[in-house]
Image: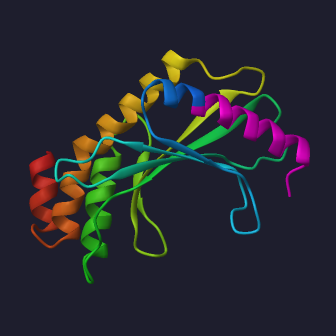
Amino acid sequence: MLPDLVHARHLAQLGLLKQILDEADLATNLLEKSEAIPLHVLMAGFQEDKKGRERFLHFSFLPLNDDDIVAIQLLQIYSTLPFHLQEGARDGVASVLLEINTRLPIGHFGINEQNELHYRYVYSISASSTFESEEVLEILSLFVYMCDMFAEHVELVASGEASAEQVVQSLR
């Protein structure tokens, strides 16, 4: 369990991040930790995908043992993809994700225990600094670009429109 001071620092930093995203005209919502939410989470809407589906970014600091790791903090940027995994498609999608993840400069695509597809990046920042607007916006731009570049390929297999082999071949 994280000390109250660490939670307070994370909340303050997410507040600064919220200001940066608000200034970039993204709709944001900062959710404080509670019985239902174990960590503070900043949510932000970002551009719809090519099919007009809403997408959201979730920001949260990963809990670290402050006795062992004191120089950095890890900020997770997470987005659930706006489509579903058809029954029986998990293995094919997993092979496509493996192929795609080798091409990504940041982050990775994955499937969680509830068969939700996501794109995730863990951003390492110095524990002694605050967010720089330009840096944050460039990282988010790259995050969205990677998501846009490969999510369509994942969806083709997840929906059953194409086989994993076809998609992997198109990526090569």
Closer to the camera in the image, 19 or 90:
19
**Residue found at x 15% / y 47%:** 171
**Predominant SS along the magenta part:** helix
**Residue found at x 37% / y 29%:** 141
Q: State the colouring used for the structure image.
A: rainbow
Q: Which residues are magenta?
A: 1-18
Q: Residue 101 location, x and y as percent? A: 35, 48
Q: Residue furthest bottom?
A: 87
Horizontal side of 15 relative to 7 (left or right) equals left
Q: Quadrant of residue 147?
A: top left
Magenta stretch encompasses residue 8 = yes
Horizontal side of 83 relative to 24 (left or right) equals left
Magenta stretch encompasses residue 110 = no
Q: Quadrant of the C terminus?
A: top left
Q: Quadrant of residue 95?
A: bottom left
Q: Residue 165 location, x and y as percent? A: 13, 63
**Residue found at x 15% / y 62%:** 156
